[in-house]
């Protein structure tokens, strides 16, 4: 296997809107079920321990024509729910036996209701998360909720799940997130070695591959990429934030790099790194998953916090840690969580003297030239004056 082989495999998974891998996995695991989930976060450990393949669904990208999906939504919301409905109604998600809709925003919550109407025979669950991070309050609610979901997944999978199986799943996903984190760390240190598109495709593959297969892929990539000699360019190091749900087209990620930006940190597919390798795999597993969620220092717009300054401080810390020289706010059009947080985050960056620029996209954005020019100007400004 070469680096090119790995990235071509990831690209093939990215391009396959029929999710052929899910059929293959089910053929290899005749008892297994497949459960889809939307961004930003669900505890994949529960799904995997129940003998089901977790499958991340992030929309249809720029290759899917929307025929029926538009009928469910008004024009002034983002593109992702339309393409998810389109994927479902066109039969592309037939291999999924269920879907989890996390509490990312009202759009995804409402989509769970639409899904129930369209697919009454499938398992459909709205996955709620606590807005209070005290173990005795939000934690109690969250653990109850996780137990409820586990019981439903057991019913779907047709078998009880032991604590040992849950702990094994926690270990596996800890390792998976650790490896994804290692790719990100290497990119932040030597961004010329790990192009933004490689990094994106690699973590994107983790949405569909089984976690053991994805771990093996990440390990192999890390081994090979360290031997690769790639030219160092005089690019500006940027952090991209706001793209945690609906994904930009791959060409947009590529355009940022062509415009002279090294993407050294991003929030494209947070589930691959959210919680890191911190979930305790020795104690009571549901409690461990709950505590990891409650206590994680990581922040994103789709997570509620009652401290206005916390997300700004987190972003500034992330800029420092990754060595970014500026921040690119890239949010899907009409994305309330990302766009409502932006002024607070910008104020925190201003106070810290960190330059930033902002644009909006949708998953099927085709006109990349204005974004490329904007990103290029931002990169030049950083290079010429040290700050944007
Ligand atoms: S892109 Fe934003 S508004 Fe749309 S579903 Fe995702 S979080 Fe919600």
Image (tube, rainbow, N blue to C red):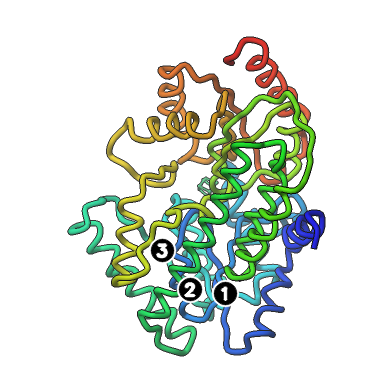
Q: Quadrant of residue 4?
A: bottom right
Q: Residue at x 61, y 33 (%)?
A: 360
Upstream in sequence: badge 2 or badge 3: 2
Foreground disc of the pair 2, 3: 2
**Residue at the (69%, 60%) spot, across then down:** 220
Report the Cα–Cα distance between label 2 and label 3. Answer: 13 Å
Q: Tell me if mark 3 has few (under 14), some (14-19) or many (20+) residues whose alpha carbon lies within 10 angstroms of its own.
A: many
Query: Where 296 sits versus 384, above or below?
Result: below
3 or 1: tag closer to the N-terminus? 1
**Residue reaching furthest left?**
136
Where residue 116 appears, x then y in whole percent? 50, 70
Q: Is the C-beta of the residue carrying label 1 under 8 Å from the nearest atom of ligand 1? A: no
Asked if the residue under mark 1 is in contact with the one under mark 2, i.e. CB atoms within 8 Å, the reply is yes
Measured Cα–Cα span from mark 3 to mark 1: 17 Å
**Residue at mark 2: C-beta within 8 A of ligand 1:** no
Q: Is residue 339 above or below residue 163?
A: above
Q: Quadrant of residue 357?
A: top right
Q: Position of residue 242 (x, y in %)?
A: 53, 38
| Circle number at residue 127 | 3
Q: Nearer the viewer, residue 340 or 44?
A: 44
* Cα separation between marks 2 and 1: 7 Å
* Residue at 24% across, 57% down: 138
Direction from residue 255 to residue 295 in the image, left or right: left
Which mark's residue is nearer the viewer, 3 or 1? 1
The residue indicated by pointer 1 is 53
Image coords of residue 141 (percent x, y): 25, 63
């Amino acid at each position: 296997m070469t680096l090119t082989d790995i990235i071509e495999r990831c690209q093939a998974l990215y391009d396959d809107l029929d999710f052929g891998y899910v059929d293959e996995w089910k053929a290899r695991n005749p008892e297994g079920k497949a459960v889809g989930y939307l961004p930003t976060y669900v505890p994949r450990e529960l799904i995997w321990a129940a003998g089901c393949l977790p499958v991340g669904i992030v929309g249809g990208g720029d290759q899917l024509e929307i025929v029926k999906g538009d009928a469910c939504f008004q024009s002034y919301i983002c593109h992702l729910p339309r393409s998810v409905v389109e994927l479902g109604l066109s039969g592309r998600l037939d291999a999924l036996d269920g879907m989890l809709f996390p509490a990312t925003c009202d759009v995804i919550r409402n989509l769970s209701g639409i899904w129930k109407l369209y697919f009454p025979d499938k398992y459909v669950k709205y996955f709620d998360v606590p807005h209070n991070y005290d173990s005795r309050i939000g934690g109690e609610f969250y653990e109850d909720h996780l137990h409820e979901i586990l019981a439903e997944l057991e019913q779907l999978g047709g078998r009880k799940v032991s604590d040992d199986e849950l702990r094994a799943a926690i270990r596996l996903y800890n390792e998976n997130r650790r490896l994804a984190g290692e790719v990100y760390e290497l990119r932040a240190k030597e961004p010329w070695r790990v192009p933004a598109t490689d990094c994106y495709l690699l973590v994107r593959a983790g949405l569909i591959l089984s976690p053991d297969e994805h771990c093996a892929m990440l390990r192999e990539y890390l081994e090979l990429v360290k031997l690769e000699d790639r030219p160092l360019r005089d690019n500006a190091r940027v952090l991209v934030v706001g793209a945690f749900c609906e994904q930009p087209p791959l060409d947009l990620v590529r355009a940022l790099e062509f415009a002279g930006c090294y993407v050294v940190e991003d929030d494209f597919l947070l589930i691959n790194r959210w919680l890191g390798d911190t979930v305790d795999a020795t104690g009571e597993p549901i409690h461990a998953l709950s505590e990891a969620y409650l206590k994680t220092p990581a922040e994103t717009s789709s997570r509620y916090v009652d401290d206005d300054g916390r997300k700004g401080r987190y972003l500034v810390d992330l800029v420092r840690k990754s060595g970014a020289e500026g921040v690119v706010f890239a949010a899907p059009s009409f994305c309330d969580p990302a766009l409502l947080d932006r002024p607070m985050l910008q104020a925190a960056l201003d106070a810290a003297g960190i330059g930033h620029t902002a644009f909006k996209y949708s998953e099927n954005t085709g006109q990349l030239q204005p974004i490329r020019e904007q990103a290029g100007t931002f990169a030049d400004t950083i290079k010429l004056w040290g700050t944007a």
